Amino acid sequence: MTTFIFDGYDTAPLTILLAHGAGASMDSPSMTATAKALATAGFQVARFEFHYMAARRYGQRKPPPRAETVNPEYIKAIADLRARGVAGPLIIGGKSMGGRVASMVADEMFAKGEISGLICLGYPFHPPAKPEQLRTKHLADLKTPTLIFQGTRDEFGTKEEVATYGLSKAIEVIWLEDGDHDLKPRKSVSGFSTADHLKTLAGTVKAWTGRIVS
């Protein structure tokens, strides 16, 4: 059974399931702050870890596997969440690699009526300094309603680069000024704080789910 961390109330009308990035756990400061911001906006948020990350808690340090190899773990997390009694509309997503994995299973789950949408927090469009190694092929035909939140300083995909990718019309990219891969801005440069961007993120998700979830 998948282990979850929950934020928000179990009476919330909608649940968001989030997976972590390649190198940081589900309870990293970034993941925790994001989950709490979404919970404050009225969502129930569930976080989980892929097996390689969970193993680190027991002294077994393993490198991140290829993203597609953990697709079954994400699908199982959805099933385990439902088995815990979490009903109602579900949005899946995650930070960086976690969002990428969610995007690879999204259409299958959406077609089955298991999920209502997808959110990606800092999508890794390509490895840093390797813009030719794109991870976007499946995004061209994605049918699941999707929000991607990307910082304008993100080395995994800049605004100029992403504009050329030909993403599906189901995808909306929200750019957060001066944000890095963790969506963190430099307040002295941008005038925005991380809390500002998380408030924008949560409010945007709230408005978006109001449109896509009947």
Image: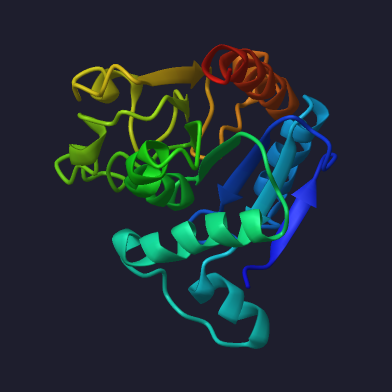
Residue 5's spot in the image, x, y percent? 74, 57
Q: Residue furthest left?
A: 132
Which quarter of the figure is the C terminus placed in?
top right
Residue 166's spot in the image, x, y percent? 19, 21
Instruction: Identify which residue, 62 or 185, lies in the foreground.
Output: 62
Instruction: Identify which residue, 181 or 72, lies in the foreground.
Output: 72
Q: Residue at x 34, y 27 (%)?
A: 158
Is residue 54 positioned above or below 21 on the image?
below
87 sits to left or right of 117: right
Q: Residue at x 55, y 71 (%)?
A: 53
Residue 75's spot in the image, x, y percent? 45, 58
Instruction: Identify which residue, 80 or 131, lies in the foreground.
Output: 80
Is residue 67 positioned above or below 190 on the image?
below
Residue 48 visible here: no
Residue 174 visible here: yes
214 sits to left or right of 195: left
Q: Residue at x 65, y 86 (%)?
A: 58
